Amino acid sequence: MKLDWRIAGLAAAFIAACALPFFVSDYRTFQFTLVMVYAIALLGLNILTGFNGQFTLGHGAFYAIGSYTAAILMAHYDVPYWATLPAAAAVCLLAGFLFGLPALRLEGLFLALATLSLAVAMPSILKWKGIGELTGGVQGLVLTKPDAPFGLPLNQDEWLYFFTLAVAIVMFVLAWNLLRGRVGRAIVAIRDQPIAARAMGINTALYKSVTFGVSAMYAGVAGALGAIAVQFVAPDSFQVGLSFVFLIGAVIGGIYSISGAVFGAAFVLFVPHISEGISRAAPQAIFGAFLIVFMFVMPVGIAGFLRLASAWARRRIQRSSPVRGEAS
Amino acid sequence: MDAFLLQVLSGLATGGIYASLALAVVMIYKATHVVNFAQGEMAMFSTYLAWQLIQWGMPYWGAFFLTLAISFVGGVAIERIVIRPFESHEAELSVVTVFIGLFLILNSLAGWTWEYTLKSFPSPFPAEAYLGGYLSGHQAGLFAVVLVTLAIVYAFFRFTPLGLAMRAAAENPDSSRLVGIRVGWMLALGWGLAAALGAVAGIMVAPLVFLEPNMMGFVLIYAFAGALLGGIDNPWGAVIGGFAMGVLENIMGVYVVGTELKLTVALVIIIGVLVVKPAGMFGRTVVTRV
Amino acid sequence: MAALLEARELHAFYGPTHVLHGVSFAIEAGGITALLGANGAGKTTSLRALCGMIATRGEVLFDGRPVRGKATEDIVRLGVAHVPEGRGTFASLSVEENLRLGAYTRKGRDGLDADFERVYRYFPRLKERYRQQAGTLSGGEQQMLAVSRALMMRPRLMLLDEPSFGLAPLLVQAIFDILRAINRDEKVAMLLVEQNAAQALDIADHAYVLETGRVMMSGPSAEIRSDDAIRRSYLGY
């Protein structure tokens, strides 16, 4: 029963997503493209922090690396936009894995600080004059948005939307497959009982580094897509705030789930705008206050809340006759 | 040699700022096992308060002490109202998110109230150079203020019953309750003290860097680096670490990598320490039982 | 005579787990009461419940006043000193600081020096080591420190959780002798939780025997000690 509902839901969402660009303005289409981009990034974050328990405040740094990889390839080497994605993925997978190796020894707070340092350093590294030729220094690089291929009757925003949608679906299916199998169980076991996991023969060091790499890969792919969508990369776009935004989005969306990435991404994109509407003057303060209240009320995030709510609803529907004598 | 000594001395002066903030961070960490990512913003907000009081005509030292008092009360209030509900939360994530929320609130409230334009902050110390030209008047004064503050804090914890109770509450809350210590209020007091310490750091650094809502960001990172270097659970290690970071920052900036990558260097230090010796120079390595 | 401490139908829970099922006992002022039973009987839990350290239901009266549901630090301030399982010393603080913390809730410094002297008279070893970090003391010395800290609170009732734990027999004897002396000279009532029933029954006036969270037996310690059946079933010797 449950499976049918979920498949129906996903199908409906897919159809709605495909229809969307034809019913809204180009700007909105662009916004929804960004939602999907962030969703891919957040999915990587969920895998690392939610499922594997490695606390990262540096996700934005890998997003930046992905963006710059794509930008450099497109601007300097005329690589077609779609080919930059695998390149960004590979670069970030490696970078994440390499960063994950020394980070293995760190837990909780310490890992957070190490990753935070990476995020804070990123703009300075990107501005470094030594690689200025490649990165365009403080000004950054400008890119051109691709046209729809094969003469399809879509404008640039619409094409990019569908391209991103396709990539997003692939990335989400990949994650879903990864997490529900043996690998996924190992990853979660490492989060919950690392010592027991190792005692059972799971190579925690390898898994943790690889998970770091995979998470970075997601951020990198998202970064590449983001760069193409925004048509621009510059060091100051990737300040430490980005990593905070990612973390907040993941937590609010529901960091222990895959669907949480989507809710979180929507939240991240639309809510700062919303809170801006409430108070022209101090939108971030409202956002901050909201965050605190949210953590108190719904720490499992939107996805977690929905899951609890649907479980509660199902129990009420199934309870046709009350059972007596149940110990509470 | 002259130039080197100059860098070291001025590094010690700025290091005093890092040391104060590092101490604040470690105090809260020892008591609650969470790092207050919003410590810098609290300090920044306090500095703005001081600035406002001075703008309204209050003499410098009056504003200084009044700000300390307000910051203390503010710290206590934040702990009781914002942090207390989350004290029992298992997930570090929830707590960190709350700190981020606090960070955002303080940062944008400051920007909204006082705008983002750079402001200059007065220094109460005479401008002429000290120590044969190695330190400016403000740097020397800052150093003195920091030392006096740290000495007072040390004396408080070491010699007063309340300080003893706070140390006990941080180390072993259960046993502390058994001797009648109200652990919750000890935490709140710790926050108040940390907030006051942060205010000192902010007020002292403001004349050097110009007052603006994002001014404490770098300072906080250096303070973290210093705290880690010295040992995140050792308050006095954190202080030494803070001073060390000040000196390192200057030496690195002038002799090794240039001012552009100064921050990167701080961060490489953080990562290096975390990987090689997470307990820092003076911290205790935590052994967990399986 | 109204009891100093009384528990009526006390239930206790660790989270959802129900561990004490309606235990009732009374402790007279100035006496020593033993709480006996095998491992897992609920002895430590009872002490924790009395001090408000875990979730409870039922009634606890200290000096006739209800204290169930109050915070631990408030109950303790009424005159109850709890020497917990594992001693509970502040490992990174010195012996002297640990003792000073015992006196934390006392208003005014009068008598503080006299109290230190008194404690050092019972446990001269502590005076030798008063500057030493508590975490570096031996097990026996830590036990002495824990009892001393409780004494510094000038309590009317001391709750002691397995004071003999991990100590050599000679040391156990010494500590129990001192406990008896403290009870007699300082007029401090004691509730003693012990697995070492023999030692406990030696100094206690009255005893309760617990099993799986219920009071199975109670009576003057002489009776409990002489009853073979009880000894074999509940006390294991």
Image (tube, rainbow, N blue to C red):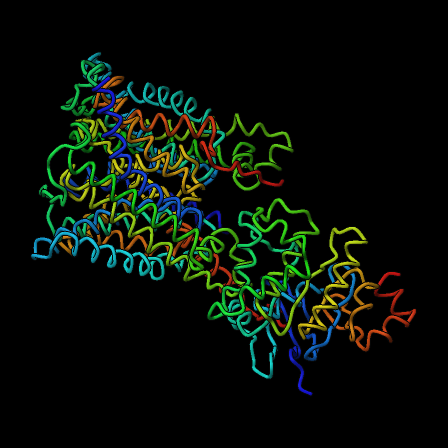
Using the image, determine if residue A4 lies above or below residue C161. Answer: above
Measured as percent of width and height from the top left, residue B169 is found at: 48, 56
> Above or below — where is B25 with respect to A127?
below
At 34% across and 30% down in the image, what residue appears? B244
Q: Residue at the location (58% across, 65% down)? A: C115
Image side of residue B140 versus residue C54, left or right: left
Would residue C46 be found to the left or right of residue A229 on screen?
right
Furthest toward the top, the residue is A77
Relative depth, front residue between C205 and B2:
B2
Of the pair A277 and C150, the residue shown nearer to us: C150
Q: Nearer the viewer, residue C4 or B159?
A: B159
Q: Is residue B34 visible?
A: yes
The picture quadrant where one finds residue B206 is top left
| Residue A256, percent from left and from top | 44, 44
Q: Quadrant of residue A296?
A: bottom left
Name the image quarter holding residue A297: bottom left
> Residue shown at 74%/71% (left/top)?
C214
C185 left or right of B2?
Answer: right
* Picture layout, residue B7 above or below residue B90: above
As drawn, which residue projects farthest toward the right? C228
Q: Position of residue A279 (x, y in %)?
A: 15, 56
Q: Position of residue A161 (x, y in %)?
A: 24, 33
**Residue C54 visible in this rendered orientation of the protein:** no
Nearest the eye: A310 or A206: A206
